[in-house]
Amino acid sequence: MRTIDQCNFKDKKALIRVDFNVPLDKDYNITDDKRMRAALPTITKILNDGGSVILMSHLGRPKGGPEDKYSLKHILGDLSRMLDLEVKFANDCIGEEATDKAENLFPGEVLLLENLRFYKEEEKGDKDFAGKLAKLGNVYVNDAFGTAHRAHASTAIVAEFFPNDKYFGYLMAEELKNAEKVNHGADKPFTAIMGGAKVSDKILLIESLLDKVDNLIIGGGMAYTFAKAQGGEIGTSLLEADRMELCLELVEKAKAKGVNLVLPLDTVIADKFDNEASKGTVDSGQVPADWMGLDIGPKSIALFSDIIKNSKTLLWNGPMGVFEMANFEQGTRAIADAVVAATRENGAFSLIGGGDSAAAIAKFGLEDEVSYVSTGGGALLEYMEGKELPGVKAING
């Protein structure tokens, strides 16, 4: 693996693709700076070598051009404080200003470019656009695992302009190492915990995992499609009617492969999608007509937790319920606690798969109690599915 440890950056200008796509509130305050903090070791190594740093990232999903609410200028102050230096800013990611500021950057200085996605060429993987970015630095570093599954100009195409001077940053290297540990070096028993809303989002991952895991726990909204497919009543719970047959096929595939596929035994129900809704608990497949399932129940928690605590490798992707609502967070919290217990007491390796799972672990203050929390939801899913990530291939060649 080509990492920045193989390069001395003295007097070099490192063009780094980072993932600073952080959430902002209405006053443009960062509400979660984890992705920015994750990039600091890479930036610091290059500065300490005597190099300078040009940072490029996207923020949000601007439509068709610059939008103030998606400007990276909003994170400039926080980034300067994190690095304890005044980060320079270019009001465009290409063009005269960006070129001048990059050319006049001294060793030890940092320049942040404006949002890459203000140009549609970024997401299209346009080579001319990538070439303009490439001219800003003489070494390319990809440290944005969260976008590694996208064949965008700044993640895959730009690397072509640095045939002998392209590297993974520390975050990318760590993400790949931990994903690989689960994908191809998992100690047994290996348990995958799949949650979230839709079966369709996780089909390829589930099918891939059936060749690797001993236990596959299914919770969250997707569990109701399984329940309905098996003849249960789910009221107004989430349902992908066109995936019911697939759910039955996955159950049969698990049996054929000797995988213990575990579905909820009970569910916490509500009469509306509201934290203050009336709630109750029923067995799975017995949800009354006008009620919906919003969390797993106590019998499910006990069953799932027992399996998790006796595992040696754990992959968790997707919450067990609507953990954003305090009255329906118990299932997700209990699974988080079980993963922590397995990690701390049983020496299990636990990988939390980005997205909502990472948000849940953060909400419960347990980020430091598990083995690794990925910064890339979609990227990790695709890597675990066995797909080649364009951002990884671009460095590995």
Image (cartoon, rainbow, N blue to C red):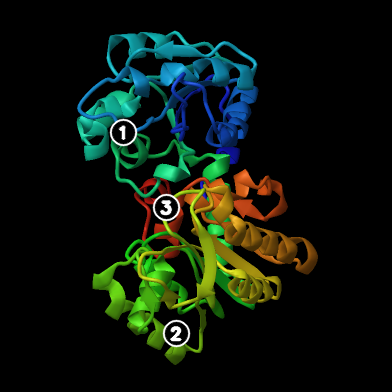
Taking the spot 50% from the left edge, 89% from the top edge, the residue there is 258
Residue nearest the viewer, comparing 362 with 283? 283
Disc sitting over residue 61 in the figure: 1
Along the line of sight, the residue nearer the viewer: 62 or 91 = 62
Callout 1: 10 Å neighbours few (<14), some, many (20+)?
Answer: few
Q: Element type at marker 2? A: helix
- Disc 2, disc 3: CB below 8 Å? no
Which residue: 54% across, 78% down?
A: 265
From the image, tell me which residue sits under label 3: 273
Instruction: State whether residue 10 is above or below residue 198.
Output: above
Three-letter amino acid code of the residue under disc 1: Arg
327 on left or right of 210: right
What kind of residue is marked 2? Ala
Say which residue label 2 marks.
254
Q: CA distance from mark 2 to mark 3?
A: 33 Å
Q: Position of residue 296 (x, y in %)?
A: 54, 67
- For the residues labelled 1 and 3, the Cα–Cα distance comes to 27 Å
